[in-house]
Amino acid sequence: QVQLVQSGAEVKKPGASVKVSCKASGYTLIGYYMHWVRQAPGQGLEWMGWINPNSGGTKYAQKFQGRVTMTRDTSINTAYMELSRLISDDTAVYYCARLRGSSSLSRWFDPWGQGTRVTVAS
Amino acid sequence: SYVLTQPPSVSVAPGQTARITCGGSNIGSKTVHWYQQKPGQAPVLVVYDDTDRPSGIPERFSGSNSGNTATLTISRVDAGDEADYYCQVWDSSSDHPVFGGGTKLTVL
């Protein structure tokens, strides 16, 4: 079945970087855009950006411009999200999610990865 | 940018019907998708394209969308439906998704 499996929890110090992986199984990574969404403790869902695994093209939310980099390795069907210059407010669970839907009016996410908890603390 | 508004919480007795709303300007002209998120778990798609259910989602989950309000309806609610529910649309002007703030469903 289609599944996204993410890397394990991370603890980082302020100013460091974190790189989260998202391995796709049950389908070919290049067939669908991959998005990243984060959720701070007790908060809602916050969109971070996407990568087109076929071309490598990316688009990032303005909030994360300059700090986030999304990449992929098609040989191992895996997408990555790296966030640099971490601050305490970056403490959150980070999800990858496969984009579905073919029209500009109808796009949704299915499935989601299980999430990666990133804790930023000194 | 486009804003989606959900009530923070909805409570319902077991066996009753829960209705969770998602408000947005002329949201009826967009397509709405709904996710269920149980504590400590990732979101799961329960309704897409306003009214469609992915395979494996019970018929008790249904959606509607008109005017300025979309609604997720859960009939014959049971304790297993306790979760946070999020609505989502695609904002074509900014070309990115927009999520509602989430609604916590409590089964009394």
Image (spheres, coloured by chain):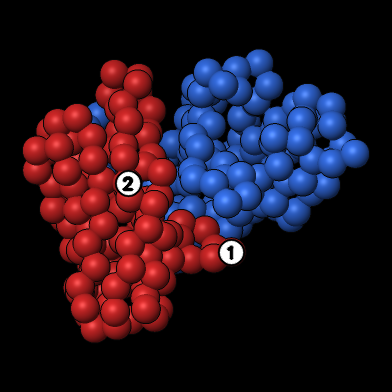
Chain colours: A blue, B red
Q: Quadrant of residue A48?
A: top right
Compared with A69, B71 (above or below) is below
**Mark in front: 1 vs 2:** 2
Residue density around tag 2, few if under 14, some if 14–19, many if 20 or more, within 10 Å: many
Location of the N terminus of chain B (image quadrant): top left
What subunit carries mark 1?
B
- Residue at label 2? B6
- Residue at label 1? B40
The mark tally for this picture is: 2
Compared with A69, A73 (above or below) is below
Q: Nearer the viewer, residue A1 or B9?
A: B9
Amino acid type, callout 2 = Gln
What subunit carries mark 2?
B
Indicate which disc residue B64 carries: none
Residue at (23% x, 40% y) in the render: B23
Residue at (15% x, 37% y) in the render: B68
Sequence order check, earlier mark of 1 and 2:
2
- Coordinates of residue B86 in the picture (x, y in percent): 37, 51
